[in-house]
């Protein structure tokens, strides 16, 4: 977050770039600026155009319109191998017949460095990614996470201005992915290379990035810090895609009140200039207070008696699904991390409290 977008020079500037496939627009007049040294993620669902955008930045696909400027220079007519850019793919494309050291040194060898220089740089980079002393190993002797780090080392050793990463953790199992996303962030911090990272995993984007662009149908819906996207989504798509939320469809009955299709009336803080019409309302599970005593939620604008339906016990991430008594509206509520209420049983009556400012409404 400390990478101040105000002072750092812009390493990558995408300017009104489009890519059309016959009758389909994969990337639609998209612009973005990435300051030097920052970790920028592009987050969006499958098919929204992420890989197309990244491949245009790398030079493998030519944009139909617009310009891409890297390190202050237009990349028009600049071949991929002449761009100060390296790309790490989901499927790593390491050379299985070469040792780890040869893999990492491959690009340096192509640049004509001596054997001594190559092995010195490769060893130093392997150490940097937490794999010291494995230059002599074969690729098939490594775990999935180690291979991923070798692939990153192979790119970083070339000292690119920009490192482009296309879902590099996608092939790893969940536990390793959780671990690698922390490591990648630390690594980026240490080396200071500008990272442009694409993913459909919102948690990866939130944890690692200085800034995130949420992409939908070839365009950016919102660009901001993880906190801005999480707490102040500007569109229903962003509210629904970033983090978990209860999503309730309905209508705005006036500027500060919505009524769900199920008939539940909710006081809300109008975040959009709207006073009537169709709306999607979002409430995050962790903003909902839950109690066995009605008096404890007395200060909440929305106070709803509910029946417990299902408890999803998952340690600190436990939630409970409840059903509002009068309308049958179902809501997911996060349980306190202390373990309080982890003994709830189906059928039990509870009371939930929702503050007006925690109901985010979007028109349409
Ligand atoms: N060569 C092509 N010809 C026609 N359509 C294409 C071509 N390449 C991609 N597309 C289409 O463009 C859209 C964007 O594809 P892209 O690979 O950029 O998506 P993505 O966001 O990377 O998705 P994923 O998360 O699944 O990797 C998709 O609908 C895809 O079918
Ligand atoms: Mg892709």
Image (tube, grey):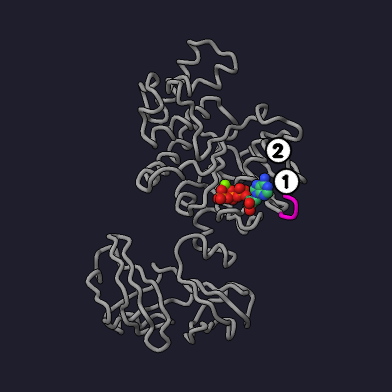
Asked if residue 20 lies in the magenta stretch, the reply is yes
Above or below, 22 against 146 in this view is below
* Residue named by callout 2: 69
Q: Residue furthest left?
A: 343
Per the image, label 1 sits on a secondary structure element best described as strand
Using the image as rendered, state which of residue 275 and residue 108 is in the foreground: 108
Q: Image check: 308 left or right of 5?
A: left
Left or right relative to 106: residue 63: right
Q: Position of residue 98 (x, y in %)?
A: 45, 21
Q: Which quadrant would residue 319 be assigned to in this image? A: bottom left
Quarter of image, res 113: top right
Residue under the point 52% across and 61% down? 241
Q: Are marks 1 and 2 in contact (CB under 8 Å)?
A: yes
Range of residues picked out in magenta? 19-24
Beta carbon at label 1 within 8 Å of ligand 1: no
Taking the spot 61% from the left edge, 73% from the top edge, the residue there is 272
Name the image quarter holding residue 148. Answer: top left
The local secondary structure at tag 2 comes to strand
Say which residue label 1 marks.
15
360 drawn magenta: no
**Residue in the foreground of this view, choosing between 278 and 22:** 22
């Amino acid at each position: 977050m400390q990478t101040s977008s105000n002072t750092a020079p812009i390493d990558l500037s995408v300017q009104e770039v489009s890519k059309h496939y016959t009758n389909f627009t994969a990337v639609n007049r998209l612009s973005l600026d990435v300051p030097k040294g920052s970790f920028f993620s592009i987050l969006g669902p499958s098919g929204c155009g992420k890989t197309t955008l990244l491949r245009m930045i790398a030079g493998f696909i030519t944009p139909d319109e617009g310009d891409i400027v890297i390190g202050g220079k237009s990349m028009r007519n600049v071949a991929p191998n002449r761009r100060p850019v390296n790309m790490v793919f989901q499927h790593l494309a390491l050379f299985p017949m070469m040792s780890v050291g040869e893999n990492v040194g491959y690009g340096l060898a192509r640049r004509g460095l001596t054997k001594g220089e190559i092995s010195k740089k490769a060893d130093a980079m392997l150490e940097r990614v937490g794999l010291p002393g494995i230059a002599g190993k074969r690729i098939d002797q490594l775990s999935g996470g180690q291979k991923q780090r070798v692939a990153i080392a192979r790119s970083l050793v070339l000292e690119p201005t920009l490192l482009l990463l296309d879902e590099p953790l996608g092939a790893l199992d969940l536990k390793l992915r959780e671990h690698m996303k922390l490591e990648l962030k630390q690594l980026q911090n240490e080396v200071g290379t500008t990272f442009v990272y694409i993913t459909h995993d919102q948690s990866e984007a939130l944890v690692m990035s200085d800034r995130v662009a949420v992409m939908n149908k070839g365009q950016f819906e919102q660009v901001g810090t993880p906190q801005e996207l999480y707490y102040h989504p500007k569109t229903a798509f962003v509210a629904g895609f970033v983090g978990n939320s209860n999503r309730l469809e309905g209508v705005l009955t006036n500027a500060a009140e919505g009524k769900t299709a199920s008939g539940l009336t909710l006081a809300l803080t109008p975040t959009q200039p709207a006073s009537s019409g169709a709306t999607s309302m979002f409430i995050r599970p962790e903003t909902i207070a839950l109690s066995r005593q009605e008096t404890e939620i007395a200060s909440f604008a929305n106070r709803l008696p509910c029946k417990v339906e299902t408890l999803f016990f998952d340690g600190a991430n436990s939630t409970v699904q409840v059903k509002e008594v009068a309308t049958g509206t179902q809501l997911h509520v996060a349980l306190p991390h202390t373990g309080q209420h982890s003994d709830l049983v189906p059928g039990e009556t509870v009371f939930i409290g929702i503050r007006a400012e925690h109901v985010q409404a979007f028109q349409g």
